[in-house]
């Protein structure tokens, strides 16, 4: 009987040691791991005395087995938490990619609207009957600017997981596009001044 009990003790110590050595860092930070580690160290250090005390040997084995069960429960919790964290990361990455794709598509639209604001004022000026609509040519750039603000709103204060370089590139492209849009507006206003001077000259 004592031999069987000693074998059980050695088995549970060995199984605890294996679990402790294979435990990930997250589990090693748990109280269950620290308690199991302390128990194993104590049992190894006092093994001869523990084995000699036949009356208390079964209690020691049950304590070690209970500690092993607690460690297994903690390990399962850590694995579940890791799985949840991984799922959250995947969902967040997919959301980040969706935002970046939307921004890239919007940049193409914005570039087209800016180009329209460059092209429309001289077009209106070339046809006197519609020259009074010249300032309408500035609307595409303004409309595009408002659209961009809405698309980039989720970017503000957002912590990006792995796409920070792409985010920086996109934001830099939009900053440059804003500068070009301002240039389109200024050119449109200059065309308006030209149209005004032309009308004034014709009136004289």
Image: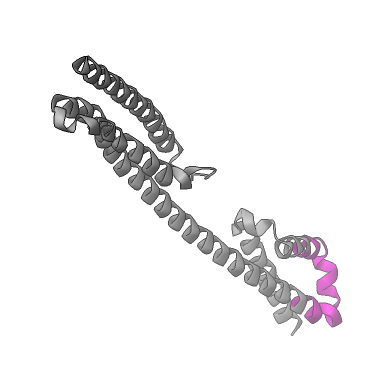
Q: Is residue 29 left or right of residue 125?
A: right
User: Which quarter of the rendered picture does the N terminus lie within?
Assistant: bottom right
Quick check: is 179 in the magenta stretch?
no
Q: As drawn, which residue projects farthest toward the front?
A: 204
> x and y percent of residue 24 in the render?
60, 56
Q: Measured along the vertical axis of the image, is residue 35 above or below residue 172? A: below
* Residue 175 position within the rendered picture, expressed as x and y whole percent measured from the top left: 41, 29
In this view, the residue in front, 19 or 195, is 195
Q: For this rendering, which residue is in front, 80 or 161?
A: 161
Q: Which x, y percent locates residue 3?
A: 72, 79
* Residue at 62% in and 62% down: 18
Q: How is the image coloured?
A: one colour
For residue 81, what is the image quadrant? Answer: bottom right
What span is colored magenta in the figure? Answer: 39-61
Name which quarter of the figure residue 65 lies in: bottom right
How many marks do you count on the picture?
0
Question: In this orientation, which residue lies closer to the viewer: 144 or 123?
Answer: 123
Q: Determine if the magenta segment contains residue 49.
A: yes
- Can you say whether 192 is above or below 86 in the image? above
- Nearer the observer, 40 or 30: 30
Q: x, y percentage for residue 118?
A: 24, 27
Looking at the rendered image, the quarter that the C terminus falls into is top left
Residue at 77% in and 76% down? 63
Our reading of the magenta stretch's main secondary structure is helix
The quadrant holding residue 109 is top left
Q: Residue furthest bottom?
A: 1
Q: Is residue 179 above or below residue 67?
A: above
């Amino acid at each position: 009987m004592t031999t069987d009990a000693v074998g059980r003790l050695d088995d549970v110590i060995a199984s605890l040691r294996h679990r402790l050595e294979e435990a990930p860092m997250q589990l090693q930070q748990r109280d269950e791991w620290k308690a199991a580690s302390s128990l194993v160290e104590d049992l190894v250090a006092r093994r001869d005395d523990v084995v000699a005390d036949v009356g208390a040997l079964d209690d020691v084995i049950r304590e070690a087995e209970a500690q092993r069960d607690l460690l297994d429960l903690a390990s399962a919790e850590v694995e579940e938490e890791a799985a949840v964290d991984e799922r959250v990361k995947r969902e967040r990455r997919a959301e980040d990619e969706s935002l970046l794709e939307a921004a890239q598509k919007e940049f193409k639209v914005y570039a087209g609207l800016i180009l329209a604001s460059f092209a429309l004022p001289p077009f209106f000026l070339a046809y006197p009957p519609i020259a009074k609509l010249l300032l309408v040519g500035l609307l595409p750039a303004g409309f595009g600017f408002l659209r961009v603000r809405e698309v980039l709103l989720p970017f503000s204060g957002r912590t990006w997981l792995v796409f920070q370089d792409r985010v920086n590139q996109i934001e830099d492209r939009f900053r440059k596009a804003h500068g070009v849009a301002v240039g389109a507006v200024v050119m449109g206003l200059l065309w308006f001044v030209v149209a005004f001077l032309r009308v004034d000259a014709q009136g004289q």
